[in-house]
Image (cartoon, coloured by chain):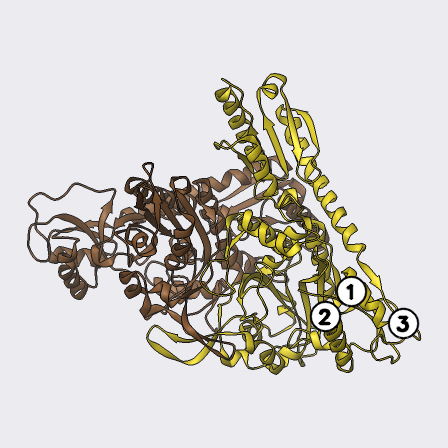
Chain colours: A yellow, B brown
Amino acid sequence: MQNKKDNFSEWYTEITKEAQLCDLRYNLKGFIVFMPWAVRTMKIMYGAYERELESRGHEPVLFPALIPEGNLSKESAHVEGFVPSVFWVTHAGREKLEERMAMRPTSETAMYPLYSLWIQGLSDLPLKLYQSCQVWRYETKATRPFIRSREFHWIEAHDVFATEAEAMAQVREDIEMTEKVVHSVFGIPVLFFKRPEWDKFPGAVATYAADTLMPDMRVLQLPSTHFLGQNFAKVFDIKYLDSEGKSKFAWQTCYGPAISRIYAALISVHGDDKGLIFPFDLAPVQIAIIPIYAKGNEEKVNKYCSELASRLSSDGFRVKFDSGPQTPGYKFHEWEMKGVPIRIDVGGKELESGELTIARRDTGKKEKIKSNEKSLANHLRSLAPEILSNLKHLAEKSFSSHMHHAKSMQELESSLEKGGFVRVPFCSVSKEGESCAAKIKEKFGGDVRGTIYPEEPVPHGEKCVVCGELASCFVYVARQY
Amino acid sequence: MQNKKDNFSEWYTEITKEAQLCDLRYNLKGFIVFMPWAVRTMKIMYGAYERELESRGHEPVLFPALIPEGNLSKESAHVEGFVPSVFWVTHAGREKLEERMAMRPTSETAMYPLYSLWIQGLSDLPLKLYQSCQVWRYETKATRPFIRSREFHWIEAHDVFATEAEAMAQVREDIEMTEKVVHSVFGIPVLFFKRPEWDKFPGAVATYAADTLMPDMRVLQLPSTHFLGQNFAKVFDIKYLDSEGKSKFAWQTCYGPAISRIYAALISVHGDDKGLIFPFDLAPVQIAIIPIYAKGNEEKVNKYCSELASRLSSDGFRVKFDSGPQTPGYKFHEWEMKGVPIRIDVGGKELESGELTIARRDTGKKEKIKSNEKSLANHLRSLAPEILSNLKHLAEKSFSSHMHHAKSMQELESSLEKGGFVRVPFCSVSKEGESCAAKIKEKFGGDVRGTIYPEEPVPHGEKCVVCGELASCFVYVARQY
């Protein structure tokens, strides 16, 4: 394998191929085939997110993949933002359609006409629905598997409230959920930013987005949540009667964790120079059992391994007994590269002693443990939080060591070279600041990610690193994917 | 509610609306919004099917939703069968595409070009993959929610083998899986038929499909499995080197359980004149707790119900404590209509006696049971197989009582009037028999579903009910959806 830190791009290309996470040979540009080793983990990630959403009052729904052009065109900022990237269906069978249909790039304009019918009074609120689905966008930027494709797999939650305060509370809840799932369960550190005016979700009042750092210390945007205000409510006529019988426009939010992209972060953040490393709960296979034969004991070893595998399976673990014809060395390497958290080697010694050798993928450490049922299962179970905590700790350390400060363009430039975030005083994240941001982009290839959330104190007397005007805020600059 | 047996069509329309299973007001013809009460059960159904497929060696994969026209056009019978129903993407953003792309109507032509790359030798076989996804077909027949839409939710499994015998064994395994999941777990009786030549899956050598009977005794096709022979292997160049180093075309099968359609059968077969009835394991809510207040005890009853609900939830049940402002009568009716298997009423009497009244939706029977933790959870758990077995028994009784035999057109006509299947001697299920089948369709609106599987003995000296030629087989005729 390539060195992950120094040659991340090559490492990423190699691991997606070697571990068979995807196949890039599908004959449509920007579309990939998601292979079993990736799909298995993505399914677990979907499950974790869906449980979290449902525990907070969201219900699952499934809207059509196609959206009539008329719907999509209703909100002007939204249509402007999305039309350049829409795949259009114009014909069905041998007929030309009267109206073009968009393959959903996101579902606001599919869902909200129905929301208008469903919401009449206060008793219909809040309305909190989500769908797990694919979206399609005709990306013109270079595509990378899982990171940016023309088809991606996500969840979108669309919520409606009677008041602005409740909608803003939902934005905070979405941020909390991201912290809980992406950081606490997947082990990926993120920072939330309120995006500048010029980088909002098309149609939103405000966008809050999680950024993580990839191993080359460029940022990758993970889930974002959008405060839509009443923008869409006014266009799609989403109104309710308040307690005094007055008709009022509702307040909305939407939230979009892209599972396929979070998967890219998962493998990149936790992997090492030997390949993938999965947190125990996310691994397609959690325990690989490798037989070590000596002359004449093949049958005995195989029987022992089979029994061990089925015992551990019925204990609820995802187990693979690798009885293939390859050498133990080949198998060690293979399961290491594929990121299986625990390896158990079984040979003549183990059969005699009743003790098993357990090797951890994340630390490389080995330990011996009695193979009797209860203690083994309990011990393996206890390793899950230990492994996660170790991976999370490593990721956090790297993340927090790439947080720089700069007060001048020169400092900004040299800090950006080190990778990660650079905090700088900045004139404004409203429309007026856009030209300063453009200069940073042009000179150093750095992107203004926005102001940090939760908000930090504003600068006192400091000057914008670009224009020298009085700074109104600190922004974080980073090179992005 | 309408009478299910006598006015099934009206019953179906009413229940899909009253129980909020879907919304038909999405502004694209033939597309529906799947609502939470339906999506929750469909997710459980997906899970059951996926576990079954994986336990038999299938792995999950995700292919693009778009297929280049060139791929789709390679197998001539396939393209002829599907092109009339394809939604075509011709533009992306503001550009016209060089080649049109089909929204997948099914994924053979997306997957098999990659299969050709993945399969080289015997060690790559068998290859057994499935994907859970949506497909889109521009149906010209009348659409009905869940039964026939222009977008449906299904699983498709695509398997490749070295030999014809293994492929045929897979067809039998697919049939077994259908029996196990659709019949044993969902409680829906089915019969498998080998479809006549003129009713095969486009591109297949043979199609085996499950038919169930809807309450109006018309048949609905459920999962079908297709023996593809080497038809696609030859077109997509799927070859392997055999043990002697000779290059050989592989043998293929594909299998397609349409979850959204099986859901239609589930609610129709088990429902009654009061609404839905779900098997315990498939219910979005398994237990509804209804508080019955008497003056002054609201707080006590609510506290008791909340505790009961959280206790049962942590026991793994899906529970709803209905603390809404409606009357108990309204709530009884509501949860009955929505098909919740178990209702527990809690009032002052229950608080005092420590005994709970449990009402079963499927039988309407009530019983009293001690509310202490262990016995209650165990008892509720024991009801799951009882409820399923009762529902299955009722469904089987109705199914088997609609199996008729006829030896003449007159008998066929009168039997078809009774509804269900009519077994008749028939000239041939090869191409030559198509005109006889067309006559049955034209005269009585009956469809020849094919010969039954497993095969039954051939007729001796009997005559085809249509043309009077010597019959080569018995076929089953029914009016279809």
Q: Position of residue B81 (x, y in %)?
A: 29, 64
Q: In the rendered structure, which amino acid carries the disc numbered 2?
A: Gly
| Residue bearing the label numbered 1 | A416
Residue B270 in view in this figure: no
- Of the numbered discs 3 and 1, the one sitting upstream in the chain is 1
**At 8% across and 57% down in the image, what residue appears?**
B467
Q: In the rendered structure, which amino acid carries the disc numbered 1?
A: Leu
- Of the numbered discs 2 and 1, the one sitting upstream in the chain is 1
Chain assignment, label 1: A
Q: Nearer the viewer, residue A2 or B468?
A: A2
Q: Nearer the viewer, residue A20 or A113?
A: A20
Q: Nearer the viewer, residue B303 or B53?
A: B53
Q: Is residue B414 left or right of residue B63?
A: left
| Residue bearing the label numbered 3 | A459
Q: Position of residue A195 (x, y in %)?
A: 73, 71
Chain assignment, label 3: A
Q: Are marks 2 and 1 in contact (CB under 8 Å)?
A: yes
| Residue bearing the label numbered 2 | A445
Q: Are marks 3 and 2 in contact (CB under 8 Å)?
A: no
